[in-house]
Image: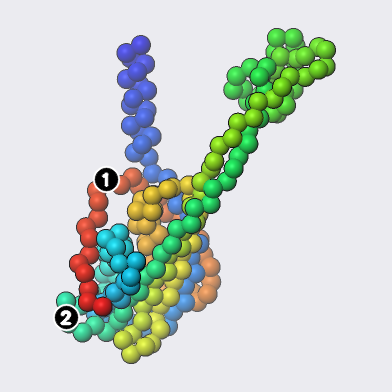
Amino acid sequence: MKKIALIATAAVVLLSGCATTLRSDVTSFNAWSAEARDQSYAFEAPQGADDTLEYRSYQLLVARELDKLGLHQAAERQPAQLLVGMKFSTIDHPVRILEAQDPFMVGPYWGPGWGRYGWGYSRLGYRPYFYDPFGYGAPVMVTERIKHEYQRQLRITINGTDGRKLYDVTVNNTSRVAATPQVMPALVQSAFTGFPGQNGVPRRVDLELKPQTETAPVAPAKAG
């Protein structure tokens, strides 16, 4: 029994470390030019309820992607050539699911087989069950559960301080992952995959959603 328990524990550890795929729908518009490279940028200060530690931690994720593009963040109180804006939202869509269970059905079985009184079909599909020779049937037990699907949207804009619109990208994703911090790194990376992309052409980006092992640092506050 101890050996079985150890094998089961190892399997749980392996499964918990596996990465899953996060699929996002990305649409971008741009008027980007090579001249924008090496320019400095500053984040637009979040307003009101948006000014949270969570929001500022996501700014750091965006900053890492901008660094890959050759941009650099302006020092505090120094003028910047570009302004970067970010907005995100999460909507929980609970779905009510009813599942019927035949009280005479024999366990979880995914194919035909023999029941107590012979071969037959159950109410839930092609499975073995205890056939009722009198034709009265048996009561069906119904259980209810709630499945949550989380619809998320991330929008990032890059504009010149002179008002020029340079980059505007929207990332949409629906998953069953409840924690936004767990999926945000992949959403931000999706926003800059294939940068700057074709204007107005929707594309799908699949990225591995890796388990989090550490908490991202929080970006320092910027003057609004």
Amino acid type, label 1 = Thr
Q: Check residue 77 in the rendering and tell me which mark sits there, or answer none.
A: 2
Q: Is residue 140 left or right of residue 39?
A: right
**Callout in the foreground (2, 1):** 2
Position of 194 relative to 211 (above/below): below
Residue 131 at x, y = what percent? 75, 14
Is residue 181 visible to us here?
Answer: yes
Along the line of sight, the residue nearer the viewer: 111 or 98: 98
* Residue 222 lies in quadrant: bottom left
Residue 173 at x, y = what percent? 48, 57
- Quadrant of the rendering where the N terminus is positioned: top left
Which residue corresponds to the image point at 33% horizontal and 45% vertical from the top-left?
211
Q: Identify the secondary structure beneath mark 1.
A: loop
Direction front: furthest residue: 48
- Quadrant of the rendering where the C terminus is positioned: bottom left
Is residue 61 visible to us here?
Answer: no
Q: Is residue 150 left or right of residue 62?
A: right
Q: CA distance from mark 2 to mark 1?
A: 34 Å
Q: Is residue 149 left or right of residue 106?
A: left
Q: Check residue 213 in the rendering and tell me which mark sits there, or answer none.
A: 1
Q: Identify the secondary structure beneath mark 2.
A: loop
Is the residue under label 1 in contact with that under label 2 (CB below 8 Å)?
Answer: no
* Residue 83 lies in quadrant: bottom left
Q: Earlier in the sequence, mark 2 or mark 1?
A: 2
Q: Check residue 64 in the rendering and tell me which mark sits there, or answer none.
A: none
Which residue corresponds to the image point at 26% horizontal and 45% vertical from the top-left?
213
Which residue corresponds to the image point at 77% horizontal and 19% vertical from the top-left?
137
Amino acid type, label 2 = Arg
